[in-house]
Every structure is written in structure tokens, then in C-alpha cells.
Amino acid sequence: MANIQLRNVRKAFGAVEVIKGIDLDIQSGEFMVFVGPSGCGKSTLLRLVAGLEDITSGELSFDGKIVNGLAPSKRGIAMVFQSYALYPHMTVYANMAFGMQLQGGGKEEIKKRVEAAAELLQITPYLARLPKQLSGGQRQRVAIGRAIVRDPKVFLFDEPLSNLDAALRVATRLEIAKLHHDMHNVTMVYVTHDQVEAMTLADRICVLRDGLVEQVGTPLELYENPQSLFVAGFIGSPKMNFLTGKFAEPFKAKTIGARSEHLEVKSNGSGLWKGEVIHSENLGSDSYIYVNVGSDEPLIVRENGTALHQAGDVLSVGLIEGEKLHKFDAVGKPFDA
Amino acid sequence: MVGTFNLWGATKTTLFYLLVIFIVVESVFPFYYAILTSFKTGTDLFRVSYWPDSFSWGNYAAVLNTGSFPRNLLNSVFISATTVLLALFLAITASFALSRVRFRGRGLLLMTILAVSMFPQIAVLAGLFEVIRSLGIYNTPWALIFSYTIFTLPFTVWVLTTFMRDLPLEIEEAAIVDGATPWVIITRVFMPLMWPALVTTGLLAFIGAWNEFLFALTFTSSNDTRTVPVAIALLSGGSSHEIPWGAIMAASVIVTVPLVVLVLIFQRKIVSGLTAGGVKG
Amino acid sequence: MATDTLAPPMAMPGVRIKSELMQQRVRAARWFLLPMLIALAVVAGWPLLRSIYFSFTDASLNNLYGAEWVGFNNYLRWTTLDSGKTVYRGLLVDPKWWGAVGNTLRFAAYSVTFEAIFGMIVALVLNAEFKGRGIVRAAILIPWAIPTIVSAKMWSWMLNDQFGILNDLGMRLGLLSQKVAWTANSDTAMTAVLIVDIWKTTPFMALLILAGLQMIPKDIYEAAEIDGVHPVKQFFRITLPLVRPALMVAIIFRLLDALRIFDLIYVLTPNSDSTKTMSVLARENLFDFDKFAYGSAMSTLLFLIIAILTILYIWLGKVRFDGGDR
């Protein structure tokens, strides 16, 4: 219901500039994920959108209306915090109803909305409990429920899964994806440092680095056409293999990159590089072989099924047919030649 | 070798426990001895004894039934309680501003408040006397409630500021997103979370006001308006030469027992409150 | 979509638009602070200024408003006699005052030193794990909880020359050869005051030091243990440096308290010149001797002395209160 525009947005804390001029358009109903290493400014950027921090310069607008100075409660946003930030002394019901009460909603209306949200998130049995009587996953649902009750135009998530254990994280990720589907006209902005979360949830991802946007695009665009060495290395798991120096020279590039899933062992010896296996990891469905080809870091090659190669084997490694190398120039920009 | 080692270990343990026993006895004995004395009357008083050997409520009856001591007790309760409530009321909002809002001069303001709480009270005595006289509250409880603000207010502000600073930021931000004003955040979100801190701070301020002497001595002039510390300090016997030790000890026990009981009940909280005001800024 | 880093930052000349939220918060903060600031100004700021003012007048208890400005006369004035000799008068050449200053400094130095040492010992004991630790902590809170006046009375009874239990105990144990008039005798009066003060305030010191001790991570000691560092060396090399910030803060709190001491001395050793402190003397002049202006001068000087000592201490000791930003 709301599209968000950032125009040269900057944020400085004292003399330290953490957001260094960001231009970004978030479409109405879109699920946008801010991702990047810690300290890249992604949480600060979200807090600027929320209005919890002042924008130092630049413009932030919702649906074409500049909201730089507007109080958070008047922006039509709801936010889910990393620590859930539930009011410890209020019941689940009171937690969810608090915002509407402050806005002077009618008792019946509040009750209806809270119960609907509770139903959606399956927390109806816990409405009378205090947050401390709930598990981590249940608290997270309450936090999401509290946001839903506000009936926001924009839904903001600040690393909401980082306090959950691995299994719960996957389950909650699914819930959030479902929520986005159900509330398809609500714009969602989601901050995470986990690129898997970003890839699985996002309509579009915004990769941030040092307070600047590195690249914005759909998960697939980022995966297939990273616009910088940084994005190439950040998106995808395991990390893209990078080769420099004498390995890159034949391709007239400063750095070349190849994803491990795009490499294979050439049993006929026709590969691009040759080296000794130093380690192999078996994950069951697939496996990763670490091959020392003489570069700084070993080349990681993905194979289907269990690894057939052991440490000490000498292999020839090349690209799977149809896959291409990523080539980067001296400043880390990709080029095709 | 093993033998000497054990001997050394045993000696160490023994010495340690001797030290522990010494600390406990040395801390408790004067109070114990005051209780002991308070139950002695007549010539028993002037016979040193280490164990309770005579028992009489005479001193307590004398203190509570004659003179203005009951009145003094009431004064102390009223003055201390009012002072504390007043200080807490002013301090809660102030400490929210000091701990939660960024503004220029905040550090300086905090240091000033700390400085006032450590103020030598004698330095303001003359000026305060003038203010109290011109307000027409000399020799009334209000003189003390007014003047005690000089140490209860900075103290409560300082301690509550450190407590409030530790409340999680995200809860406040959640409230902001929910549309809560600072006043709503204080009254409906923070206050319920701060009850323990408020009780602790209030108790410490209460003890401070209860024990105050200089102002109470200076700003009251009649038996009926005094607080208990002054009453005890000025308690005299029938004749001017005889100090009524038994009665003094009974009065001392009466004013001290409630404090000691409170302190022992709220032990942990008091320790955390004291150190919040001191070590951890 | 990557931003062009070479683009000049948008022209935003000097004007920072404060958001509604920040404006609301700063406005609220102002209103929240105002009552407290007014209260402090009325009970502390204004009276302090008036006290200083009185010290430059000839005010007396019954004539506060008709007081006339006399400049520095209360502090120092001189007359030249016919014989050519100059006679100085005033607070700055008053031996009683300097005696009180000496008493106060002596009292503060001794009491704080002993309290720091004993407080450290008690804190180390409380920091150890042993059965009955709770009892010890409860026990040391008792002296702290007892009103100063009450403890002064309790001790003056225990220190009583004829019937005091301390004289009795001292005689029985053979530590004293004869009964001592602790509070009346000018040689022992200060000792008596120190005993009571140290007894009463060591717990406060111990608790503050204990809080500092508990912030030292345990694994440091485990590492030292493994390295075979002797416990005494552990104390001086690890514990003391790490607990120093807490100790320094505890000491300044106590020091400020000791420098303004009034009640204990007023009750325990009234009229003894060997224990009369600045506060006692100043109050005596203000209200008992009807030398209101002279007493004001004393309290002003006392304020100055304490302020200078505090600043020196904080500066030399590099004390940090960390009362700063979140």
C-alpha cells in the first residue's frame, strides 16, 4: 500500500557518517531485504525508515510524501525487533492492544483485531499469559502479532530471527514468507546479516556495505550477475571461489570468480586448473572438495552425492558446460569479454 | 610433607573463620549492647555485664509515656515519608530525561547533580535558614521536608538515572512505534518495570532523611517539632547532671529496630542500590 | 543501481530538520527536568549564594535583612596601632578556625584510610565463598543502618569512663592499666571519634569495593593460579589494579562525607577542642554565638576547601564516574 523512496539519505552520529547517501525505491507490496556484514548500516537504515533516528540529510518519502520529520507512530509502520521488545508486565493481549489503545481505538474494535491477529498466528491460547511464560518462538509470534494489529502499510523487521535456534528459525522464516503472501499489499522491509534468509524471503535484496548500496536486485539477479566483487562474495554459499594474479591473467581480468556448484572434476584432465585434494566434506546430498591449485585459498568444488575423492588425489577442475566465469576488473567491477 | 600441608590448610581456614567471627561480632555487638542496656534500670545500669541478666520494660515505658518522644517519632515518619515521595515524584521524570534523551549539557547536568548530593550541608545552612524563615516554615515539619530535598532529590535522580539507563532500548522504541509519548512511556511502560528500583531508592532516601541531624537541629526549636535523632541527642534526665542512659538506649533501639529490619529484608536490593549510586555510573 | 559516490552531497545548508519525535522528546525532557532544577535551585543554589553573601556582611541572627556590606572584613582586616604595629584579625588568622581545619583534615585522612583498608578486608572476605556469607553481609549492614546519632550515643555509653564496657573489657584483658575517659580526654577524643566513624562506615566502603571485586572476571584468577602466581602477588598485581576505579570512587564519596562531618562529633565529643571540625565550629558561630556573618564566612571557606580538595582528588586520581552517555 505504500512505496518508499530514499533520495541521497545520509546519517551521521556526531562526526561519524554511517549512511553515506542512499538512493532506493521500495515498491508497494514488495518484500525488500537489507543485507550486509555487521557495521554496514543496514539496521540504521531501517531505523531511519521507521523514524526512530533523525535523517541527517536527504529525503525519505512514503507514497511521494516526504516523511523525514514525521513521528514513527504516524508513518503507518509496524516494527518487529530483534529482542521482541514485548512489554514484560503486560499480558499478550495487552501487548497487542497497547498501540491501538493509545490511538484511542474502540474496545470492541481492538478486541476484534487482536483476536484476528492471534488466530492468524495461532497464539489465541496464550492471550492471557505474560511474555515470560512463553517460549522464544511464541514471543516472536506475539511481536509479529503486535505489529499486525496496528494494520500497518509498512512492516519493518530488524533481524527478527537472530535470537531463535536453527530449527525454529527455518520454521519462522516460513511463517514470515506466508505472512507476506497473506498481506500481499503490505510493504515489508527486513534486515538481516544472513544471506540465506535474504535469498529465501526477498522479492528484492539490497546489499549494503559501509553505508552505501552495493547492488539492488532480485535474489536471482544478485546470484547470477553480481555487480561487484563484494556482492559476488557475499551472496551464495559456499562463498564464490576467487582467483587472482597468474590465474586471472589469461582471462585479461584482475580477479576471476567461479561458484563451487559451477565447477566439476574433469576426469579426462581437460580442466582449467590442476591440484591436489586437501580435504573433502560430505553433507550426504552433496559434498565439497577443497583443491589446492596453488592460489591463496583452495578451490571449492561441489559434487552431487558423496565425494569420490580423498585427500592427496590430484584432480583437474573445470567449469561445467554452459556455466561461465565471473570476471572482475581492478576496481572489482564485472565485465564480459 | 602432606601433614604440614594439611596443617597449613587448617590454620588458614581457622584464621579465616576467626576473621569472619570477628567481623560479625564487631558489627553487631554495639547494637546488642544497646539492647542489653535498654532493659536495665536503676543500679543495674551501672554494672557492666556481657549477657542479658536483668529484664525490665521500664525504660521503654518511660520513653514512650513521658515527654514528646512519641510525637518526635511521628514527626520523623511524616517528614521522611513526605520527603521521599516528593523526591521520587520529581526524580522519575527528571531521570527519564537524563537517561533516555540526548541533549546538550547532559553530562554536565549529571555531574552537577552528583556534586549537589555530596554537598557540605553546612555551606548552605545560613542561606537556607534565611529562606526557611522568610517562607514562615521555621520550626515546622515543612522546614525539614523542604531542606531535606537538597540531598534526597539528587540522590534519587542519580540512582534512578542509572537504573533507567539499563532498561532495554528496544522496549522504549516499541512503545514509540505504538505511539506512546514520553509521559506514557514513563507511566505505563517504565514505571511498572521499575518498582524494585523505586522501592530501593525510596528506602535509601528514607534512611537518609530519618537519620539527618544538622538541619533537624537547626530548623526546629521546640520539643514537639523535633525529629528522633535530635530528640535522642538532647534527651536529658531529671537533673542536669544525670544522663539517662537507659532511656537513651531504649529510644535508640526503638528508632533503629525498624531500620535494621527493613534493611535486612531488602538486603540485596539495598546493596544493589548503594552500588548503583556509587560504582557503576 | 549502485550509488554514484562521486556525486556531491545534496546541498543542505546548515539547516537540520529536527524530526517530530526528537522535538517531542527534547521538549518533554525540558519539562521533566524543570521541576527538579527549580527545586535544586531553591534548596541548594540560592542558599549557597546567600551564605556566601552573608559572609561579606555584618549580618546577625536577628538582623538578617539590615545587614551591611563589609567586604572582606570577616575574612581579614587589620588595624595599625599607634606603635606602628599592625594587628590582623578575621577568619584567616583565627587559630580556632585553623585548628578546626586541622582536625577535619586529620579526621578525614585517618578515617578514610582505615575504612579503605578494613573495607577492602571485609570485601575480600565477602567475595570468598564460604558458609555463612549471607550472615556476614547482613551483620555488616547493621552499623550502616543505625542512625549516626544513635551510634554516637551507643558508643559514648560503651566508651563511658566509669561504666563503659570497653574500659571493663580492656582492664579484664590487661590492655588497659586504668580506666580511660575516652571522649573527655583531649588525647583520646579523636581516637574515640575515629573508632565510631570507622565502625559505622566501613560497611559502606566494603559494599562498594565488593561490587568492584565482583566485576573482575573469575577466569583471570584461574589463569593466575595456573601460572602459579602467589596469592599476595595476585592481590597486588590483579585485584588492586582492577578494583582501583571502584575504590577511588568509594574513597571520594567517603572523603566528602568525612570532610563535612558534624553529627557524630557534635554528640560524641561536644566542647572538645581536639575534635572540633569546620562544620561544628561554623554552626556554633552561626547559631550559638550569634556571629552569623563570621559563621557564614567559615561555611564559605569550608565549601571552598572541600571543592578544591575534590577537584584535586578527581584530577590527580583520574577518577571516572562514568555518569555519561548511553
Image (cartoon, coloured by chain):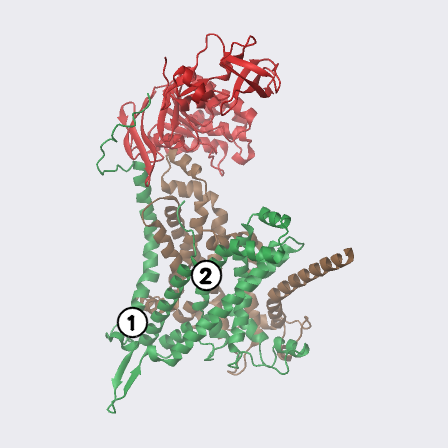
x and y, in percent, of residue B77 in the image: 48, 61
Task: Classify mark 1: helix, strand or loop.
Answer: helix
* Left or right: C5 in relation to C177: left
Q: Is residue B230 above or below residue B201?
A: below
Q: What is the drawing colour of chain B?
A: brown
* Left or right: C35 in relation to C271: left
Q: What is the drawing colour of chain A?
A: red
Q: Is residue C317 above or below residue C76?
A: above
Q: Amino acid at mark 2?
A: Phe
The quadrant holding residue C157 is bottom right
**Image quadrant occupied by the C terminus of chain A:** top left
Q: Is residue A212 visible?
A: yes
Q: CA distance from mark 2 to mark 1?
A: 29 Å
Chain whose colour in the figure is green: C
x and y, in percent, of residue C228 in the image: 64, 51
Within 10 Å of disc 1 (Cα), the crowding (few <14, some 14-19, many 20+) is many
Residue where numbered disc 1 is placed? C54
Mark identifier at residue C317: none
Within 10 Å of disc 2 (Cα), the crowding (few <14, some 14-19, many 20+) is some
Most extreme residue toward the bottom is: C83
